[in-house]
Amino acid sequence: LLRRRLRHLRTRDLPLRERRRQASTRPAAPLGRADYFVTAVRTGRTGTPKDLSMLLIERGPGLETKQIKTTYSTCCGTAMVIMNNVKVPVENLMGKEGSGFKQIMYNFNHERWMIAVSLIGQGRQALADTFMWSRQRKIFGKSLIDQPVIRNKLAASAASLETLQAFLETVTYDMCKTKGGAVGDRLAGPIAMLKYHTTRTAWQIADDCVQIFGGRGITRTGMGAKVEGFKNYVKYAAVYGGSEEILADLSVRMAMRAFPPAAKL
């Protein structure tokens, strides 16, 4: 492997003013581009998780990216990354060789918790906008909120959102107080169940909000923008960090590990 230092290591001893000058004259990366890529690569042939190692790969010769447009947003930088004979310095190995799979697993619990936090926050904003819209929208001389079916949808969404909030706070407290924190074996199941329940419930909340907003609920701008964005993000959240089916299965399997084998009715 080619041995060389990363750019930020080469410039760390320069005066602050000089580093700022270099940073300001460096051309900005186009949309969908990154300067560094944290990548799990295969470094062994044993057929086990120990074959994976984590590398920090700097953009350079042989590395190309092509933007992939999504229904969510282009600002997230989703792209196809193509690597062809890319040379990486040995200093760019993150952790020990063969520990890449473990690093990925360590990240999952925090990622799943973060997705739940983001989704619940967006759900609150979408429901608040929906509540205000139902009060100001007039149909046949009456506000939408005067209709029992609309109040029923609002009540169901609000109750569901509060259950998610309570679940989130319980798991968050556990993450802060339990030995080992979020990466402990015991919390893998509860965090997986939290994300699964959050995405499933948020989908119903988003559906109710869009139905109340009507046509405005599927427009990217205007008063329905937050509802439309929430509706799109829900499905992304259901896939990112582990799909719903995987997480539901994981939560039960983790519960089975701690379940007394002799327990029966």
Image: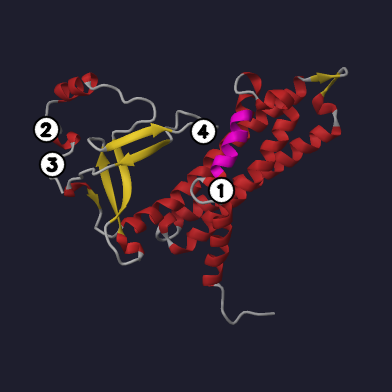
* Any part of residue 120 in sight: no
**Disc 2, disc 3: CB below 8 Å?**
no
Mark 2 vs mark 4: in front: 4
Q: Residues within 10 Å of mark 2 (few under 14, many from 20)?
A: few
- Residue underneath mark 2: 13
Q: Which of the two discs, 4 and 1, labels the residue nearer the N terminus? A: 4
Q: Which of the two discs, 2 and 4, labels the residue nearer the N terminus? A: 2
| Residue 105 placement, left or right of 221 | left
Q: Could you tell me which secondary element the residue under label 1 belongs to?
A: helix
x, y percent for residue 114: 48, 44
- Residue underneath mark 4: 70
Q: Which of the two discs, 3 and 4, labels the residue nearer the N terminus? A: 3
231 or 40, which lies in front? 40
- Residue underneath mark 3: 4
Magenta stretch in the rendered image: 228-237
Residue at 31% from the left image edge and 35% from the top image edge: 64
